[in-house]
Structure formats: structure tokens, C-alpha cells
């Protein structure tokens, strides 16, 4: 069976690859949006913390024999705590200043973290074994579905929708949304906003680390893996707008899929298609697909 | 005013004499980046727009000049002009898209568009891919002055740098520059006064882009190569750092910043070796490779404690006393 002269299995496997990339975009842009909502800071370090998540998983396995499943829970917590330390020690001094300083500071943190990992491990990628439970592939008739990739999509979608549920449908989430709207008022109601800010940053960062652990067996674990991703995620965020949680998830997944199809039909464009779409969206709807113009 | 004129005259005399005392290639490198950082500062320091995509302007100009001079055999001055025009043209497109959003989004858009330029440079046939363009000849300026001599090249670069600096100074102090500053200080106010803010932003962006292109073209001629490093986002970050260290929104800041950062990059390895010899700690020997780490650290320190930069702090000190 063929579509536009492209065989079905190839099409499906690229669709799956697109969904995998899309789920990384979704998780990363979701974290960026949550952080931006409350802290008004664009966390450039998000990519570096993603890389750190992957590296911690790799180090845990190779130095301490911590397996994938444990790493999936422990690493986000560890990186999240690291994020809270960053917020407490550095970011909090910048809230009264121009937003640009937050970007510059987190850019500096990115360079520092990348530099540290590079000085220990160089730039070449470290392999990370797919966990035994998920190795191999399932025969779906039309294509062989690699189990691990399917797991990545399922796991990240679950996390994304859990996040959406917590923020949009629970009491804690309503505090967060109120804090995004008007932090002074929320504080007046007796909610400890600085703690909420720290926890939010920690949570956003933990999402990035979770994505990093998920990515470790697929991508090569290297010091540069985060910075390439974060720039694409920035474009995703510009396209989607950071106003809505669901918007971030949908835009991330959608762009991943579009990127996957581009790889089938016109491979030369696959690296740039997201940026081209960003330019088009800026021309037609500058506020982004789900954004609100202030 | 006369005092600063005397200051500039002394500085110019020092620059004319400098290649006899300091390695000219190093000086030319510093001047190219001082020009690049000054062009960047025109946006962040005077218009309040943080571009994170200036490497794309610098690098694509570097590629065009390299290609035109080495592969097509056109004269040097044509190469520089075409490079500058490339910078301006890409800046026009980038600016048109980016000024549709403000603040943090502006920065993300410039970064994303620059990444697109990077991928194009990686894939396009004429850029030489991972190797870049090597062995670009310096040729003869106007067919007369032989640029393969470092000293001749030095004075050409000096003329370009001084001319551009004069242009930047003139722009900043012109009515146009005042409007730019008004936009930086209070954009809604500038709008309510009847200024077409987007037009001014775009003009500032294109001017900055053209000068960044000029810096990139000149750099290609000095070193004889254009590579992917010139378009990589690392360089965009580096030019932000130069400006930040020297002082955002000061005329001399970017120049001081460029000098410090370039010197740091070039001499860090030597300094590390010296430290290793002095303290016999092996780790210092690898310091030359940890430039990224150090630039990150400087970034963090500057943003947290030193936002006015060196020139800004000095100016503030004199204002107080």
C-alpha cells in the first residue's frame, strides 16, 4: 500500500518518530510555559537540565547500577531540587528587573552546565541501553512498532495530561493559576508565593529532566543534546503561545508530526520546517496559535 | 566635549602605533568583534531589543565574502560590500518577522531564525559544510594595496572599525538615535507621541545587521576562512556577553568587552598552563578547553552583580563623585 508514492510502513514509522519528537517538544514547552506563567522568566537552561536528566540516568546506571525505572522517578526529583536551588540562589534576585536578565542568567547557567559535562565527558555521545522490558518491537502488521518509542509517547502524554489536570482541575492548580494572574493578591490571601514560585520552577525543571531520562536510550547522551532541542522548543513556544497548557501540548505534538512527515516528503527541509512554520505563524497570527495578545 | 575629543585622538594615535607593539592578528580580531559588539549594542543598548541571532548576520556575511572572493575571484572591496549587503538583507527579513512580537518573544524569534540560517549554511553546497570555506585570499584593495601583509591589512581593518564607530556615534546622537532611546525607555509613550515605532525598530535592526555583516566580512578576510562557528548560536551568546561585560548602552562598553573576552579566549590556555606549572595541579592544564564554562560563569556574575558592565560602572562612579 502506498500514499503519494511513499510506502505505508515508512510513512507510519516516520509518524511514530514525529510523535516521539513531538512528545519531547510538548513536555519541554509545557515546562517553559508553566515557569513563564509564574516567574516571567524564559528558562534557557531548560535544555541543559534536560541534558542533565539524561546524564544523571546514564551516570546512575554506570556508576551506581541504578536501573532505568528507578532513574525515571529519582532523576527528575534530584534535578528538580537542583532547580529549586538555582531559583533560590540566583533567579529570585531578578524578578524586579527586565525579563531579559532572566534569559541571560539562564543562558549563562546553560553554558556553565554544558561546559562542566563537556570537560568530563567530551562531546561524543554515550550509549544508554533500552531497558530489557521494552527492548524489541511489536509486529503491528503494517509496521514493526519499536516498544520503547511507543512507551515514550505513552509516558510523556500521560505526564502532560496529568500536569494539565493538576493545573486546570485541582485546588493546587487554582493557586498556581491565580498566582500567574495576580501574585500580590494571592499573597494577601495567605498563600506563600515565594515557596510556590520555587516549587513551580522545580516542577518545570523536573519535567525537563523526565524528558531527558526518556530520551537517554533514543538519543545519544551528550553535553550538546539539550541546546539543539531548546532552540526548536523556543520556536514551538512562539508558534503555540505560552498562554495555554493544552495549547503547548497540542502544538508540541503537532509540530513533531509535521516534522516527521517532512522527513518523508522533503528530507532537506526537516531541520528547518519548524522555523519556517514559525515565520508563517508570525505573519498571520503574531500572538501565536493559542496566545492572547496583551 | 573637548576632553572626550582629546581622548579619542589619543586612542586613535595609540591604535595607529599598536601593531608595532602587539601581534596585529590579535588586534584585528579584537577590532572585528568590537565592531560586531558595537553593532549589537545599537539594538540592545539603545533600542532595548535583545537579539539572540546576530551570529546569523555575522556568519552569512562571512560566507558570502569568502565565496565571492575565493571562488568567484571578485575584488576584495566588492566582497566586503556584498557581505555587508547580505547582513543587511537577512537583517531586514529577520527584523520584519521579529518586531511583530516584543520582549522575550523577540529574543526567541531571532534565535530560532538564526538557527534556521545555521541549518541552511550546514546544508547549502557553497558553504563547504563542516569544513567551511578555507584559504580565502586577502587580495589587493582597489587593486593597489597588497593586503597579504598583516600591517596593510591592519590599517584597512582600523579604517573600517573607526569609520563604523563614527557612524554608530553619529547615529546615537542624531534625532533618530533619540527616538531609539525613547522606544527603549518607554515604548507606549513613543507611540503616543506619534512615532511609528516599528519603522524605527526595523531601521535600527537593519543598521545593526549591516554593521554585523561588515564585521563578519572583515573577519573572513583577516583569517582567510569562514566556518560554521561564525553562524552558531554560541557566537550570538558571545556577542551578548561582550556587550554585557563592557556595559549595555555605552559607546565604549562593547569595545572594552570585546577586548576582554577575546583576550580571555586566546590567553586562557597559556594562563592555565602557567597556573599548572605554578601550583602543580594538573587540572589547570585543561583550562583552555573550559572556555564555555568560564563564559557561563562570567554571564552569571555579570547578570547578578554587575549589570552596568565595566564602562557603565566607571561612568556611574564619576557621576556620583
Image (cartoon, coloured by chain):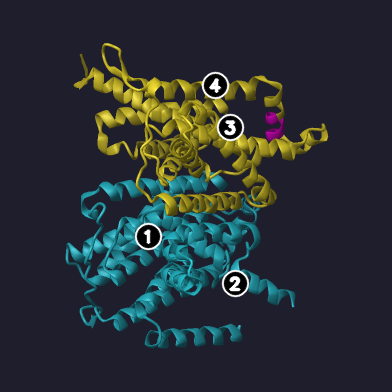
In magenta, the rendered stretch is A176-181
Cα separation, mark 1 vs mark 4, equals 42 Å
| Disc nearest the viewer among 4 and 2 | 4
| Disc nearest the viewer among 2 and 3 | 2
Q: Secondary structure at mark 3?
A: loop
Q: Is residue B208 left or right of residue A267?
A: right
Q: Earlier in the sequence, mark 3 or mark 4?
A: 4
Residue at 58%, 32% in the rendered image = A243
Cα separation, mark 4 vs mark 2, equals 50 Å
Cα separation, mark 3 vs mark 4, equals 16 Å
Please name the color used to draw chain B.
cyan
Cα separation, mark 2 vs mark 1, equals 25 Å
Q: Are marks 3 and 1 in contact (CB under 8 Å)?
A: no
Tell if the residue under mark 3 belongs to the same chain as the one under mark 4.
Answer: yes
Name the residue that disc number 2 marks: B311
Q: Is residue B44 left or right of residue A229?
A: right
A119, A251: nearer the viewer: A119
**Which SS does the magenta portion mostly show?**
helix
Question: What's the mark number on residue A243?
Answer: 3
Amino acid at each position: 500500500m502506498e500514499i503519494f508514492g511513499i510506502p505505508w510502513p515508512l510513512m507510519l514509522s516516520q509518524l511514530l518518530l514525529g510523535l516521539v519528537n513531538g512528545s519531547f517538544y510538548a513536555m519541554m514547552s509545557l515546562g517553559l510555559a508553566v515557569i513563564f506563567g509564574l516567574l516571567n522568566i524564559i528558562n534557557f537552561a531548560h535544555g541543559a537540565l534536560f541534558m542533565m536528566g539524561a546524564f544523571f540516568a546514564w551516570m546512575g546506571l554506570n556508576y551506581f547500577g541504578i536501573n532505568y525505572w528507578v532513574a525515571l522517578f529519582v532523576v527528575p526529583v534530584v534535578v528538580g531540587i537542583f532547580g529549586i536551588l538555582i531559583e533560590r540562589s540566583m533567579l529570585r534576585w531578578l524578578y524586579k528587573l527586565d525579563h531579559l536578565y532572566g534569559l541571560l542568567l539562564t543562558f549563562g547557567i546553560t553554558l556553565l552546565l554544558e561546559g562542566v559535562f563537556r570537560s568530563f565527558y567530551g562531546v561524543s555521545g554515550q550509549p544508554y541501553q533500552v531497558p530489557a522490558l521494552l527492548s524489541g518491537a511489536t509486529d503491528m502488521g503494517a509496521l514493526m512498532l519499536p516498544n520503547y518509542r511507543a512507551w515514550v509517547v505513552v509516558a510523556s502524554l500521560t505526564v502532560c495530561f496529568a500536569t494539565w489536570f493538576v493545573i486546570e482541575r485541582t485546588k493546587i492548580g487554582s493557586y498556581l493559576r491565580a498566582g500567574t494572574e495576580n501574585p500580590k493578591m494571592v499573597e494577601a490571601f495567605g498563600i506563600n508565593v515565594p515557596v510556590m514560585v520555587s516549587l513551580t520552577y522545580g516542577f518545570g525543571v523536573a519535567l525537563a529532566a523526565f524528558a531527558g531520562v526518556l530520551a537517554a536510550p533514543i538519543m545519544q547522551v551528550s553535553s550538546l543534546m539539550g541546546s539543539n532541542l531548546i532552540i526548536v522548543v523556543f520556536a514551538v513556544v512562539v508558534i503555540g503561545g505560552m498562554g495555554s497548557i493544552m495549547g503547548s501540548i497540542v502544538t508540541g505534538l503537532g509540530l513533531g508530526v509535521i516534522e516527521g512527515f517532512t522527513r518523508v516528503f522533503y528530507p532537506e527541509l526537516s531541520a528547518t520546517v519548524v522555523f519556517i512554520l514559525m515565520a508563517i505563524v508570525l505573519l498571520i497570527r503574531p500572538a501565536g496559535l493559542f496566545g492572547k495578545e496583551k | 566635549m573637548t576632553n572626550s575629543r582629546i581622548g579619542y585622538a589619543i586612542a586613535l594615535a595609540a591604535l595607529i602605533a599598536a601593531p608595532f607593539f602587539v601581534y596585529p592578528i590579535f588586534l584585528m580580531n579584537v577590532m572585528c568583534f568590537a565592531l560586531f559588539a558595537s553593532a549589537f549594542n545599537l539594538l540592545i543598548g539603545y533600542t532595548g531589543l535583545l537579539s539572540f541571532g546576530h551570529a546569523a548576520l555575522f556568519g552569512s556575511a562571512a560566507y558570502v565574502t569568502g565565496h565571492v572572493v575565493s571562488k568567484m575571484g571578485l575584488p576584495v572591496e566588492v566582497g566586503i560590500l556584498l557581505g555587508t549587503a547580505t547582513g543587511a538583507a537577512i537583517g531586514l527579513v529577520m527584523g520584519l518577522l521579529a518586531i511583530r512580537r516584543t520582549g522575550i518573544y523577540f529574543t526567541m524569534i531571532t534565535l530560532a531564525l538564526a538557527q534556521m540560517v545555521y541549518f541552511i549554511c550546514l546544508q547549502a553546497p557553497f558553504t563547504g559544510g563542516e569544513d567551511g570555506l578555507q584559504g580565502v585570499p586577502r587580495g589587493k584593495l582597489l587593486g593597489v594595496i597588497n593586503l597579504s601583509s598583516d600591517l596593510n591589512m591592519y590599517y584597512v581593518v582600523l579604517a573600517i572599525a573607526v569609520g563604523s564607530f563614527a557612524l554608530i556615534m553619529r547615529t546615537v546622537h542624531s534625532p533618530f538615535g533619540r527616538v531609539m532611546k525613547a522606544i527603549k525607555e518607554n515604548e507606549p509613550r513613543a507611540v503616543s507621541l506619534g512615532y511609528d515605532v516599528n519603522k524605527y525598530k526595523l531601521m535600527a535592526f537593519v543598521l545593526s545587521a549591516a554593521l554585523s555583516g561588515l564585521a563578519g566580512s572583515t573577519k573572513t578576510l583577516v583569517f582567510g576562512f569562514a566556518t560554521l562557528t561564525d553562524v552558531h548560536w554560541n557566537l550570538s551568546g558571545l556577542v551578548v556577553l561582550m556587550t554585557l561585560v563592557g556595559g549595555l548602552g555605552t559607546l565604549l562598553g562593547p569595545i572594552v568587552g570585546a577586548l576582554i573576552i577575546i583576550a580571555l579566549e586566546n590567553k586562557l590556555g597559556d594562563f592555565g598552563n602557567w597556573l599548572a606549572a605554578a601550583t602543580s595541579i594538573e587540572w589547570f592544564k585543561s583550562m583552555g578547553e573550559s572556555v564555555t564554562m568560564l563564559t557561563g560563569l562570567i554571564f552569571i556574575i555579570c547578570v547578578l552583580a554587575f549589570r552596568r558592565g565595566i564602562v557603565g560602572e566607571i561612568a556611574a562612579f564619576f557621576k556620583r563623585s
